Amino acid sequence: MREVSLLRLYLLRAMYLLVVVGLGAFAVPSILRHAGQRELAQGIVDAMLLAFWLLCMLGLRYPLRMLPVLLWELVWKVLWLGMVAWPAWRAGTMDADTAENAFNCSLVVILPFVLPWGYLVRYYLRAPGDPWRAQKAASAGAPERKVAEA
């Protein structure tokens, strides 16, 4: 029995594909064509977009293993909308660039319908965390968990 349905895996792949095609058509060519030095903030944005694009390509093959990439996308966009776009809109100070970015970020509303929330809760919230140090002896009755030491 699968933990995540085949339909959900296809939806995740469609989300990764949307990012790969969207960024691949609009952002990646200009990032790769850029010659010379970049302004600090623009360089950070370009590097993060390119990394996100590459990781989403990997998500096409491994949709569940790359879920943290989609979670990161959801969280940063919701935070940006709440911390930057919403206050600017309420104050009537939203400029054209902020409005364009707000529209682009608002497309994140698709993501909560695609994410396998049951899987995320089981493996990211309820599952035991990785150990912080090597365990010397197993607890009474508990199976021993070995941690490789470097």
Image: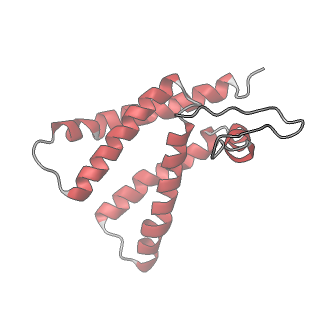
**Can you name the residue that lies furthest to the right here?**
141
**In this picture, residue 19 sits left or right of residue 118:** left
**Can you name the residue that lies furthest to the left here?**
36
Where is residue 112 shown, x and y percent of the image? 61, 46
Question: At 83% across and 40% down in the image, what residue appears?
Answer: 139
- Residue nearest the observer in this picture, 64 or 136: 136
Where is residue 32 shown, x and y percent of the image? 20, 36
- State which quadrant residue 87 falls in: bottom left
Question: At 74% across and 40% down in the image, what residue appears?
Answer: 122
Above or below 94: residue 5: above
Quadrant where the N terminus lies?
top right
Task: Say how the picture is coloured.
Answer: secondary structure
- State which quadrant residue 95 falls in: bottom left
Question: At 38% across and 32% down in the image, what residue appears?
Answer: 54
Where is residue 15 shown, x and y percent of the image? 51, 34
State the count of labels: 0
- Residue nearest the observer in this picture, 33 or 150: 150
Where is residue 110 shown, x and y percent of the image? 55, 44
**In this picture, residue 4 sits left or right of residue 103:** right
**Can you name the residue that lies furthest to the top here?**
1
**In this picture, residue 26 sits left or right of residue 112:** left
Above or below 9: residue 40: below
Question: At 45% across and 27% down in the image, what residue appears?
Answer: 58
**Can you name the residue that lies furthest to the bottom here?**
91
